[in-house]
Image (cartoon, helix red, strand yellow):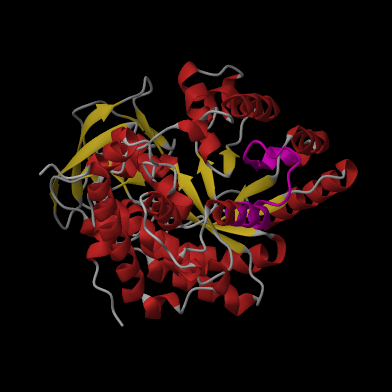
């Protein structure tokens, strides 16, 4: 006897619903730590991760063939959507059995949380716009007014640059501009974090730069002892890192422009063979970022410098960005440090820029849900270098889906219309990239000489794409982030 396809669909959906409910029940004690305003979101996140821990592509195809919802674009209300399909197939629910996390409820929650984080905006069709402030803004009173008038909602100040005297001047200018224009603007501070940077301590140290070519052998070391005067020696600005490196591991310098492989590591230092230089300028400069995607680097995400910045941030900021956060322990440390300063700390934005943060994203979100509101930033610069540029398209989508399921607002960051901002002319590819920003709640623009033009162009792109980006139909193959989360034992 040939099975009824609708009955088989109903059987499979019922099985998945039971798994969802079981996984929530297993985490009942953990859910007690979640803020009351985040309870529904936390359960929806677990429901979503349960489903995404499975490969349901074949089921989705069957649903589509039968004219039913394929569950795509239902991240924010996945259980309720599954129940809606089951109701169409004849399953009867009591009113109290229907999940409260409906499409309407979840949409309202994400809008409310976005407003709490990023403020109010007059243009409700497009995401909020965050602009990176530069020290040069202190010499241009009219620029900040122009940025507000053209659509800036959030001002970003990076603690890795300048100092408190400059930051307070920027804040004062912003407040004056808000008063003159009658527009509001939130203030966001980025913690510097343990950004590992180059420090030339031998050849090239006087000029702060040194020429290199593919095939060169350079050294990563804490000191210059044992090296000849012609040896290129780089000392990472965080002590102890060199000893953690192993043979065969990759090292990227200057946002991935230079790639090297560790050939050996002794008491003298780590020998690094340069195998690729993707720039016309074959040189290494002081202060450029270094990434170790294969290495187990054990350094604190919250540095002493970050801690020293927190009192100023708590006094002046609405949001604080946690750079290079890796796990729940890191997040707990920042949460506690903020509460030691004030009972009403700025809202936290988790910057996802390491492989560990991607892997631990569900746990980070659940820990963040102990507070009424927080956000996530997809910091695509360091993240792309760490996980590989070829994986960025996939990973940034996964982060968006998972955050949507947790009702967590997302900031789309790094190199948005960067060529336009620096040169005044946009490339074709960055126009396409900017259109993807419509899937986030906020878009961050880096500093540059054409920021006003960038905002105008970005708004035009986002308005054009606004009616289209929700129409894509995704299929739910097994998601590794979800599978890994489901495999972690639940501790009572």
At 30% from the left and 52% from the top, the residue drawn is 52
Locate residue 319 relative to residue 250 in the image: left or right.
right
Residue 132 is covered by the magenta coloring: yes
Q: Position of residue 406 (x, y in %)?
A: 47, 58
The answer to whether residue 303 is visible is: no
Q: If the image is split into quadrants, where does the N terminus sit? A: top left
At 27% from the left and 45% from the top, the residue drawn is 6
Q: If the image is split into quadrants, where does the C terminus sit? A: bottom left
Q: Nearer the viewer, residue 80 or 329?
A: 80
Q: Position of residue 10 (x, y in %)?
A: 29, 52
Residue 205 vs 36, above or below: the answer is: above
At 39% from the left and 71% from the top, the residue drawn is 329
Residue at the front extreme?
1
Q: Quadrant of residue 308 in the image?
A: bottom right
Q: Position of residue 183 (x, y in %)?
A: 82, 45
Q: Quadrant of residue 356 in the image?
A: bottom left
Residue 214 vs 55, above or below: the answer is: above
Residue 216 vs 55, above or below: the answer is: above
Q: Nearer the viewer, residue 29 or 88?
A: 88
Q: Position of residue 26 (x, y in %)?
A: 31, 75
Q: Which residues are magenta?
A: 108-137
The answer to whether residue 66 is visible is: yes
Residue 437 vs 344, above or below: the answer is: above
Residue 488 is covered by the magenta coloring: no
Q: Nearer the viewer, residue 445 or 57?
A: 57
């Amino acid at each position: 006897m040939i099975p009824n396809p609708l009955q088989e669909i109903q059987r499979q959906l019922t099985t998945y619903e039971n798994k969802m409910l079981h996984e929530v029940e297993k985490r009942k004690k953990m859910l007690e730590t979640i803020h009351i305003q985040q309870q529904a979101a936390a359960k929806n996140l677990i429901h979503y991760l349960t489903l995404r821990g499975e490969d349901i592509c074949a089921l989705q195809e069957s649903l589509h063939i039968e004219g039913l919802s394929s569950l795509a674009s239902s991240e924010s209300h996945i259980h309720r959507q599954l129940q809606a399909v089951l109701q169409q197939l004849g399953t009867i629910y009591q009113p109290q059995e229907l999940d409260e996390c409906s499409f309407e409820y979840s949409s309202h929650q994400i809008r409310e949380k976005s407003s709490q984080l990023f403020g109010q905006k007059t243009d409700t069709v497009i995401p909020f716009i965050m602009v990176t402030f530069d020290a040069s803004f202190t010499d241009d009173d009219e620029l900040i007014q122009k940025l507000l008038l053209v659509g800036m909602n959030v001002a970003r100040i990076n603690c890795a640059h300048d100092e408190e005297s400059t930051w307070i001047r920027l804040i004062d200018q912003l407040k004056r501009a808000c008063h003159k224009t009658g527009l509001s603007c939130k203030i966001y501070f980025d913690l510097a974090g343990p950004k590992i940077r180059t420090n030339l301590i031998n050849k090239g140290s006087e000029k702060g730069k040194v020429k290199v070519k593919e095939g060169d052998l350079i050294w990563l070391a804490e000191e210059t002892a044992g090296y000849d005067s012609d040896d290129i020696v780089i000392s990472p600005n965080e002590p102890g890192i060199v000893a953690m490196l192993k043979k065969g591991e990759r090292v990227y310098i200057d946002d991935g422009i230079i790639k090297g492989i560790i050939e050996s590591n002794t008491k003298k230092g780590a020998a690094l063979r340069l195998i690729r230089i993707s720039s016309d300028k074959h040189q290494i400069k002081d202060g450029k970022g270094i990434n170790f995607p294969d290495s187990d680097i054990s350094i604190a995400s919250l540095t002493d410098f970050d801690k020293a910045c927190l009192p100023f941030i708590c006094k002046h900021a609405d949001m604080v960005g946690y750079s290079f956060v890796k796990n729940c322990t890191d997040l707990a440390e920042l949460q506690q440090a903020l509460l030691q300063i004030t009972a009403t700390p700025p809202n936290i934005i988790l910057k996802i820029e390491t492989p560990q943060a991607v892997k631990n994203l569900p746990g980070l979100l659940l820990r963040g849900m102990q507070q009424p509101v927080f956000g996530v930033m997809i910091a695509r610069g360091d993240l792309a270098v760490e996980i590989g540029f070829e994986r960025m398209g996939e990973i940034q989508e996964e982060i968006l889906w998972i955050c949507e399921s947790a009702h967590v607002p997302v900031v789309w960051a790094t190199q948005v219309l960067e060529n336009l901002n620096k040169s005044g002319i946009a490339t074709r590819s960055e126009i396409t990239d900017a259109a993807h920003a419509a899937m986030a709640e906020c878009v961050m623009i880096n500093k540059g000489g054409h920021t006003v033009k960038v905002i105008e162009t970005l708004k035009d792109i986002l308005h054009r794409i606004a009616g289209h980006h929700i129409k894509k139909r995704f299929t739910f193959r097994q998601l590794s982030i979800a599978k890994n989360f489901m495999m972690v034992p639940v501790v009572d």
